[in-house]
Image (cartoon, coloured by chain):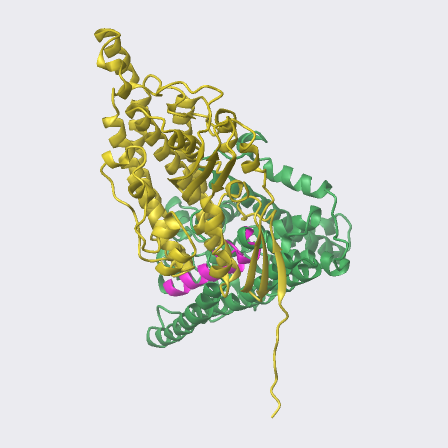
Amino acid sequence: MVMIETKAERMVINMGPHHPSMHGVLRLIVTLDGENVVDCEPVLGYLHRSMEKIAENRTIIQYLPYVTRWDYLATMFTEAITVNAPEKLANVPVPRRASYIRMIMLELSRIASHLLWLGTFVADIGAQTPFFYVFREREMIYDLFEAATGMRMMHNYFRIGGVAADLPYGWIEKCEDFCNYFTPVIDEYEKLITNNPIFRKRVEGLGTITRDEAINWGLSGPMLRGSGVKLDLRKVDHYELYDELDWDVQWDNGGDCLARYLVRVKEMRESTKMILQCLKQIPGGSFENLEAQRVLAGPKSEWTGMDYQFISKKPSPTFKVAAGEHYVRVEAPKGELGVYIIGEDSVFPWRFKIRPPGFINLQILPELVRGMKLADIMAILGSVDIIMGEVDR
Amino acid sequence: MYGGIDLQRSLIEVLSSLGLPTDVAKVIWMLLPMAVMVLGVTVGALACTWLERKISAAAQQRIGPEYAGPFGLLIPIADVAKLVIKQGTIPAKADALLYTIGPALVFTSIFLCYLVIPFGQNMIISDLGTGVFFVIAISSIAPIGLLMAGYSSNNKYSLLGGLRAAAQSISYEIPLALAVLAVALMTNGLSTIDIVNQQAEYGILSWNIWRQPIGFVIFIIAALAECERLPFDLPEAEEEIVAGYQTEYSGIRFAFFYGGSYANLLLAGLLASILYLGGWELPFPIDRVSDALGIEPNTAWWQVIAAFIGLTATLVKTYAFIFFAILLRWTVPRVRIDQLLDLGWKFLLPIGLANLLITAALKLTFPFAFGG
């Protein structure tokens, strides 16, 4: 018996680096069978700038302005890891006040990153409007950053042993205002997005990663927590003073794009809660208070003590990276951001290996999109949350 | 063409009195409503583009265009001027003929549909007996143009967009036709004029939306899909296939697509208002007004006023639909291709059939209310 065989020719389509939804310069070589994705191969390197090699020829202070260009949406984290690495290597103490300032900045930065992720993720699915809403709140965070650091995105704020400057007058109140304003705004987003039937249909059960897969692929951050692994480096590594705050790791069992969305939204709420706690607990309170106390109690009082400083000791431009090697990591919004540093008691690090979360999380993309529809590539890629500046470095 | 007055006859009489043969006068007359219609539709479509900008801006907490003319009203003109003087490139490996025919075909088929769209009792180019059937038939030509454009561009994104457009149009044409058929069943005719007149008796209460609520919903969904508006704008989904079949287009050819899509939206709005919202009828019979004011309904000046009121009523209803479509576009995400087809074939089609059956049954049972 003769069977009529219909065979459609496969189409190889080149998405990117200039495709509208490739989050910068990612390139995907997608093999399509009609609308179905047969295969997908990511091509990286269009934004490679030799960030690791540059680090080997710079002192830490010189290198700090470069690092905000890795993940340019969560800039505080890149600075934090760059100063944490030599700090831990040389055992530089960080004053409690400085640590609190750092935590506030990190959590604000996490909210800013998640906000922009939310905008692009929903835009990838086709709803353009939330993108403008998230920029409204993100601008407020950047205004806070500008007030404290002088820059909106490329702050150059963290220093070995603390931060570059204390918080300015009135900053703590402004930050508190923002936090109180922000929680209802998240409710507003959720009203608009979370239960929208079209959104639900597009992301529910899509790009599912099981718990084991997530661990085996080395995923981290919301990608891992969205698959039911309750791992957060802030709890695991006990860095800064996160243990002094009352907060929970946000996670979800779904493993799909919706779970990752929910985890990130919950993290924004949690971060707001943490910032409010930090603002209450920060040693010395607002800078106005600290200054007044210092004037009142004189130069020998406790207010000039170590706890109330914003930096332990101004780092010398020729700060030597101590001999030894060390891996340090922080919980960045995208996942585990780590640096493997090798020092040889010179002003330059001998090796400065960056472990970007986006790069590692991106690996699973071809696995997830195989067999899906063309439109699902964007939803899944959006839920992975990559920043090419960090993936390519 | 205007109001209850037979403008056609008066114009022909005037021209004949000037010494022109009656046949020539008729030809001149024929050109006039066409020119008015093409111009009117173009202006209406341009107004839609301005509304799109302004409403999306309002939804996104922006201001939108404001420097080009008052409230940015000149932006559509600037758009057209820019597109007209722009070089119209044809990709080296494209099929130049199909590439050019594509947009023209889309544009023409949409404008042809306006032949049977009434803006008032006599404000229609031609009151065909087949009315709405003509609209459905002619608007089915547009996807061929889209497919042509997508295929001839020799671009993979364009091809995907063209195929999506074809698949989408085919699947949503049928529910649309079924919804319209139910209305035609109640009217006992396909003529657009008859459909409106049938809704005229008791003002707002006799509008088809009350008798065809399911049909109205089906029509709205299918019309949005036919117009390729979000949540059904898959053929030009920017995040997925760049700009779909329009990817390679520029200049005047792109303007055809762009203008055509807004003219199509306007057409959908007009159809919605004619089929379900009583067309040019006010929420109360306009005769009541003339009775209350003590005016003879056949007075010439009253006829002119009534015609203008009717025209305004049509446009208000139409732009209400367009406002809804624009707001929807800037609120919801996009569906996926398989979900789109599922919705069309597995949901709207059965519901549409059921609606048609129910309408027929109701017509037999309650002939006074369902146009027996």
Residue A179, image quadrant: top left
Prevailing SS of the magenta stretch = helix
The magenta span reads B213-238
**Residue B348 location (% of width, % of height):** 43, 68
> In this rendering, is residue B81 above or below B169?
above
Give the colour chain A carries in the figure: yellow
Which one is in front, A49 or A134? A49
**Residue A163 location (% of width, % of height):** 38, 24
Chain depicted in green: B
Residue A315 lies within the magenta run? no
Q: Taking the image as drawn, is residue B324 in sight?
A: no
**Residue A317 location (% of width, % of height):** 48, 20
Could you tell whether A295 is left or right of B122 in the image? left
Residue B168, image quadrant: bottom right
Could you tell whether A312 is left or right of A303 in the image? right
Residue B367, image quadrant: bottom left
Taking the view exactly as shown, the residue that stands out farthest to the bottom is: A1
